Image (cartoon, rainbow, N blue to C red):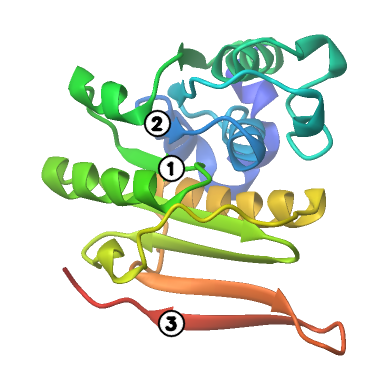
């Protein structure tokens, strides 16, 4: 099997030159839970050359219903390592590297990336991702989900510190909204890495109103 065969439908979309350019891209996904699984599944088979997954946590039975990269056989395994194994089993043209550690330790390694993707579940770590991204001049894509709601933003010059940096844990969550928001996040990432236009520093907030209609609101984020 050749890359032109494997990525045939994407090459039809944007041509072989763009597809080949993705081979030189390297990204970091911080968190390998619900959003991280979706991002890894979507981007791990896109042609991006190197993907680094960061997570110190292990797979628990209550994770599996919404963290789509895991099976019951993965219970107890490190999440980043399990995700990387799956990605490489699906795509022979990607290098997936697992980092079994917290972000505060990972950022000290000094690695450079074309893009960082937030797939964490707490605001303090996202605040640290933003500070690290600003210091290294690396764009990053934020996403969060709760219940039936979610939000995504491609951060470039905007200031994430406008969020209330507190350790908020959602009371409940459904699998489809995790996949929905993760897919939107992955779309923004892939468009950027492929050299296509992406609206930066704009927050997309998606939710269902009382009538069950899916609403998308957009907010410009203040610059740092």
Residue lying at the far left of the rendered structure: 135
Residue labelled with disc 2: 28
Q: CA distance from mark 3 to mark 2?
A: 26 Å
User: Residue at 69% of width from left, 75% of height from top?
Assistant: 207
Residue labelled with disc 1: 117
Q: Which x, y percent locates residue 126?
A: 37, 49
The one nearer the camera, 95 or 208, is: 208
**Which of the marked residues, 3 or 2, is nearer the chain's N terminus?**
2
In the shown orientation, is residue 65 left or right of residue 27? right
The dot on residue 15 is none
The dot on residue 219 is 3
User: Residue at 55% of width from left, 65% of height from top?
Assistant: 151
User: Residue at 44% of width from left, 40% of height from top?
Assistant: 18
Q: Which x, y percent locates residue 69?
A: 73, 26
Q: CA distance from mark 1 to mark 2?
A: 6 Å
Q: Is residue 105 visible?
A: yes
Of helix, strand and loop, which one carries label 1?
Answer: strand
| Circles 1 and 2: CB atoms closer than 8 Å | yes
User: How many C-alpha atoms fall within 10 Å of the one at disc 3: few (<14), some, or many (≥20)?
Assistant: few
Which quadrant holds the N terminus?
top right
User: How many C-alpha atoms fall within 10 Å of the one at disc 2: few (<14), some, or many (≥20)?
Assistant: many
Residue lying at the far bottom of the rendered structure: 211
**Which of the marked residues, 1 or 3, is nearer the chain's N terminus?**
1
Of helix, strand and loop, which one carries label 2?
Answer: strand
**Which of the marked residues, 1 or 2, is nearer the chain's N terminus?**
2
Q: CA distance from mark 1 to mark 3?
A: 20 Å
């Amino acid at each position: 099997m050749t890359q032109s065969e494997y990525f045939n439908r994407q090459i039809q979309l944007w041509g072989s030159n763009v597809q080949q350019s993705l081979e030189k891209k390297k990204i970091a996904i911080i968190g390998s839970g619900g959003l991280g699984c979706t991002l890894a599944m979507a981007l791990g088979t896109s042609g991006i050359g190197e993907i680094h997954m960061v997570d110190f946590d292990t797979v628990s039975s209550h994770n599996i219903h919404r963290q789509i990269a895991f099976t019951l056989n993965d219970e107890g395994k490190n999440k980043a390592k399990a995700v990387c194994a799956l990605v490489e089993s699906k795509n022979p043209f990607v290098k997936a590297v697992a980092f079994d550690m917290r972000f505060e330790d990972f950022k000290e390694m000094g690695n450079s990336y074309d893009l960082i993707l937030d797939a964490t579940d707490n605001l303090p770590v996202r605040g640290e991702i933003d500070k690290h991204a600003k210091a290294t001049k690396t764009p990053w894509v934020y996403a969060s989900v709760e219940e039936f709601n979610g939000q995504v933003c491609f951060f470039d010059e905007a200031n994430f510190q406008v969020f209330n940096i507190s350790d908020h844990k959602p009371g409940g969550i459904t699998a489809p909204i995790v996949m929905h928001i993760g897919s939107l996040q992955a779309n923004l990432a892939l468009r950027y890495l492929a050299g296509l236009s992406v609206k930066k520093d704009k927050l997309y907030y998606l939710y269902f109103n009382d009538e069950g209609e899916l609403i998308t609101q957009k907010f410009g984020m203040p610059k740092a």
